[in-house]
Amino acid sequence: MTKRIFRSIFLVALAVLLVCTVLIMSILYGYFNDEQHAQLRAQTDLAAQAVDALGETYLSQVRTDGYRLTWIAADGTVLYDTDANAGRMENHLNREEVQEALRSGYGSSEHYSDTLMTRMLYAAEVLSDGTIIRVSAEQQSMVSFIVRMLVPLIVMLAAAALLSGLLASRLSRRIVKPLNELDLDHPLENDTYEEIAPLLGRIEHQHREIENQMAQLQQKQDEFSAVTSSMSEGLALLNAGGVVLSINQSAARLLGTDQSAVGRDILTVNRSLTVQDLLLKAQSGEHAEATLPDGDSEYQLVASPVLSGGQVSGVVLLIFDITEKSRAEQLRREFSANVSHELKTPLHSISGCAEIIRNGLVKEADLPQFIDQIYSEAQRLITLVDDIIRLSSLDEGAEDVPREPVDLLDCAREVTDRLSAYAQQQQVTLRCSGDPAVIQAIPRLLGEIVYNLCDNGIKYNVPGGSVDVTVTQAAHESVLRVRDTGIGIPKEHQNRVFERFYRVDKSHSKEIGGTGLGLSIVKHAALVLGATVELDSVPGKGTTVTVRFPHP
Ligand code: ADP
């Protein structure tokens, strides 16, 4: 812009200068021309008077100094000429100035030389005797005037061009400076040319519009981030080339990366073939799903293409952590297999005994023994089925059952009362003590926790041993503790006794009617009630199980 302004100013200045020069030159030339004509007329007049008075005497004596005087008779014959022999000169009657003088008393004309460098001025005046005096003088022509003025003109023009160049440069810089110094962030605060005020007003308006749009975009971005960051599912948006455009916290966590993944190819974040295949499918416009095992965890990946104008412009990748789900499925499969196995054993035993009896292979005396066997196996089946039903009912959303206030001590007393006969039979002392502790619970589940713990305490005890059930109430929790002086659980089994069908000594447990589900029920029920279970056991000394019910 500075250059354009400079060029414009400079050219205008130069043009004005040239036009002025030409004008001045032509005015000057006109002035000098008029002067020369006037001078020639005055001299012609003087010469006319002198010739009138003195005739040829004057002409022969006068010093002409660049002038040529010709005396012409009325018929055009040259009578005398200061520069040439009059006798040899042609008739001058037809000369323009002579003709004019004959008409009006005075005439003038001018003739240019071939080079146009000089011109001759002629003036003629009629004398009193009818003769004509003609005066001619060589004068500079316009061309020679210009040629003579050329050097000073060039010098002047060069100086003027230099000066106008300097001025144009300063001026253009001064014009542009306020424009360069415009504060476009605050357009209306600028104190500059009023011509650009509308432009600044428009910029201000657009500023506000851009700010509004940016704020809206930011708000949408924040909303999107808020929604996606609170999602437990992973969400990643990729462009058509697989570059991560956005990734939420869950996706970053599940893929083992962070926000630095944004802008990188997803394959540099996770190189597995599963992800590659999934992306290829999505990039070709298909919806694709796959599971991705990763250490102890398992993820389900869902990739959907984003289509715009029939072209895949990006990919939405959803990642679900299905570790718990597949673990639960695994447990369910194991549980079903275990249940079938556990049920099959007593059934085989019952069927075997019944078959032997039916075939008449049992002596009369042995019959009660076989019937006992059938009875105890059937009892075992009933216990097993009972436990399975309890567990299943726990699996099927006991969480929804409403809680009610239950006194833990009452519940413990009721269970110990129920089991006192069994304890006596096992020669075990069963005691219950403590403070009343009312908690919000599901009475049936609470009963099952206490029952199973007490039952185990009696079952895995030794004759003369004891089981103590105590209930304590603290500021932030109520605690149920079942301590026995039984056989204890070896360290290596302590972590596993809460698994379904897990038994430390399978044959001993079966013998005494264990199903391997008691502690599973305790753990599950405690989970539903929001309680924690701790096991502390020393083989040969006894076991203490502590269940803590935190107060809400
Ligand atoms: P079961 O029906 O066989 O008793 P549980 O789930 O209640 O099944 O217990 C799992 C295993 O843990 C039992 O088989 C037993 O070996 C051991 N166990 C549980 N409670 C006690 C205890 N109080 N003392 C010693 N061992 C125990």
Image (cartoon, helix red, strand yellow):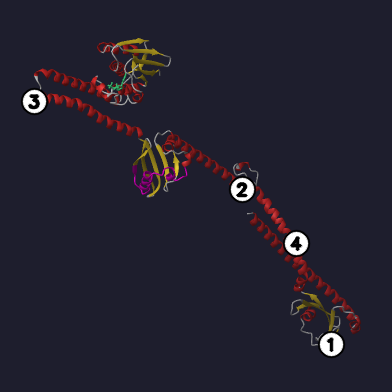
Foreground: 153 or 400?
A: 400
Hey, what amino acid is under mark 1?
Ala
Foreground: 274 or 285?
A: 274
Q: How far apart are marks 1 and 3 (CA)?
A: 187 Å
Is residue 59 inside the magenta stretch? Answer: no
Instruction: Place residue 525 in its image quadrant.
Output: top left
Q: In the rendered view, does 512 fall on the left or right side of 245?
A: left
Q: Is residue 131 visible?
A: no
Residue contact between numbered discs 1 and 2, judged by CB atoms under 8 Å: no
Which numbered disc, 1 or 3, marks the residue closer to the eye? 3
Give the label on residue 359, or none.
3
Residue contact between numbered discs 2 and 3, judged by CB atoms under 8 Å: no
Residue reaching furthest to the bottom: 87
Q: Distance between the residues labelled 3 and 4?
A: 142 Å
Is residue 271 inside the magenta stretch? Answer: yes
Please state the quadrant of the image where ligand 1 appears.
top left
Which numbered disc, 4 or 1, marks the residue closer to the eye? 4
Image position of 61 with respect to 304: above or below:
below
Residue placed under numbered mark 2 in the picture: 196
Quadrant location, the N terminus? bottom right
Q: Distance between the residues labelled 2 and 3?
A: 117 Å
Residue placed under numbered mark 4 in the picture: 159
Residue placed under numbered mark 1 in the picture: 86
Foreground: 417 or 314?
A: 417
Q: What stretch is highlighted in magenta?
A: 262-289
